[in-house]
Amino acid sequence: MSETLLLEAVAVTKRFPGVLALDGVDFKVRAGAVNALVGENGAGKSTLMNILSGVYADYEGTLKRQGQPVRFAQVAEAQQAGIAMIHQELNLVPHMTVAENIFLGREPLNATGLIDYPTMKANAKGLLDRLQFDASPDSLVADLRVGQQQLVEIAKALSKNAQVLIMDEPTSSLSEKEVELLFDLICSLKAEGRGIVYITHKMDEIRLLADYVTVFRDGRFVHEGTADSLCLADLVRYMVGRDTKDFFVKTQHAIGPERLSVEGLSLEDAAHPGQFILQDISFSVSSSEVLGIYGLMGAGRTELLEALFGVHGKRVKGAISIDGQPVAIRTPKEAIHHGLALIPEDRKRDGLVLGMTLEQNTSLASLWQFLTYGLLSQRKEHKEAESYRNSLHIKSHSCCQQAGQLSGGNQQKVVLSKWLLTHPRILLLDEPTRGIDISAKNDIYALMDKLAGEGMAIIVVSSELPEIMAISDRILTLCEGRLTATFDKDAFSEEAILKAALPGCKEGDVPR
Ligand SMILES: Nc1ncnc2c1ncn2[C@@H]1O[C@H](COP(=O)(O)OP(=O)(O)OP(=O)(O)O)[C@@H](O)[C@H]1O
Ligand SMILES: [Mg+2]
């Protein structure tokens, strides 16, 4: 494997007010190789990448570009040096087109000095084709799904002909198909001699992609080695600094009475009348039960939770009962009134007020709990936020820290706390552990287990098979908007569940 160093960080330290985010870390980007950077939420991964790509100029230590010390005072300088970053939070301009976003600030000009739109569009089209992404260069970015926006970011990085590409959790909102395309692309970028930095919490991605693995913990460098010399147990030990407990084992709670039942639920596609996003779905979930919903991206998982939560209003047909009583849920407000809560997948969008503190964010969805004679009890608010901060190990210097200052994964945990605090009777969770590190995942599983033990009925969507098998009492599989199978705990098998979720598998092929 080649050892040409494209970019190197030596003894880099970065302080934020009250936080030492990086403490003398080293990091290397080699030509033709992927260096996966891993570590728990708040380990300092995004911070280092922001330094490599010129976002933060005030740090101690040295960056070397092909052996020469460099210092980027701004993003444009890093770009000039061939370094491009695809951010964890997307950085596009929503009301501009795909082509305009890709070439923002570097638009091709014609002889009269005006933007040469035909060339710009043609160049954009070439890049999109390379990504096998069939959006038009004229589409508005605001009209694209998050996963597609991510592809635009990647096209933008390619357009700069960057030698070093930094990807911060790039697959968190991509579909399986888009992930495959991205992985193919990374392989071809490697073959061209580019260096890739790949930040992820997903162990299977490390196995598939990484040539080198670097581990940070609490802002410190812990380990770097070749990926094939590292086993999972070692990796986890480097990340958390101790041997981990075995994978979460669920408590077997006595399942209570039936809480929610759904008969013949359908959801018509607003854009294509006569077509259905969900069709004829019937199931129930009981008190103290965790019902897992597994399906591939696009199977209708998120839409099913949204339909139950009243997001799709009257477009949802079918009968829903709660505690044996028929109910009509046409709005999220009605859903909340009936004791439902939905923790959405896109937690960033529906999630946090970045300028408010952690505890203010935590209480936001359940302020009524904190009112005494109409006044907000800050003591109570503080106590609840503090208890979630401890149980989910939210890394922050206190509950009074601004949410905007937390790392990506820790922000996710605050959003989770906020919804859990609403104490619903029926909790709907959509991919609750996305972007969350390995040990925090276990904390979330344990919390779900505790809530089930207290009688809550829980429906959880996950696209990770080992996860959903570990946390559920029963699993339903969805495929192309239909329920294809139901598995009781003793019938859980990765192969059977996956088979039931794959298109082309007919009802009756799998156990019900
Ligand atoms: N703008 C900021 N102001 C203050 N503190 C910050 C800021 N950005 C990051 N931090 C702190 O720096 C530390 C490292 O954060 P960073 O975002 O680099 O973590 P990360 O490894 O990317 O985590 P995640 O996996 O959750 O994305 C955290 O303690 C975080 O709270
Ligand atoms: Mg991060």
Image: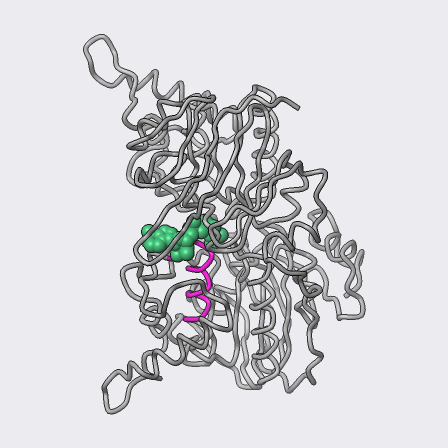
**Residue depicted at x 43% and y 23%:** 125
Q: Residue furthest left?
A: 112
User: Which residue corresponds to the image point at 62% horizontal and 22% vertical from the top-left?
Assistant: 2
Can residue 208 be seen by looking at this rendering? yes
In the image, residue 167 lies in the stretch drawn in magenta? no
Query: Please, is residue 509 above or below residue 166 in the view?
Result: below
| Main secondary structure found in the magenta portion | helix
- The residue segment tinted magenta is 406-418
- Percent across and percent down for residue 68 are 42, 22
Looking at the image, the residue that sits furthest to the top is 111
Question: Residue 424, image x and y in percent?
Answer: 48, 79
- 228 with respect to 403 (left or right): right
Residue 62 lies, in percent from the top left, at 40, 33
Can residue 273 be seen in the rendering of this structure?
Answer: no
Q: Quadrant of the C terminus?
A: bottom right
Q: Which residue is painted at 70% across and 70% down in the image?
A: 249
Per the image, is 415 magenta? yes
Q: Nearer the viewer, residue 286 or 20?
A: 20
Along the viewing direction, whichever of 236 and 108 lies nearer the viewer: 236
> Where 260 sits versus 104, above or below?
below
The N terminus - image quarter:
top right
Residue 138 screen position, x and y as percent: 35, 30
Horizontal placement of 81 versus 5: left or right? Answer: left
Q: Is residue 254 left or right of residue 157?
A: right
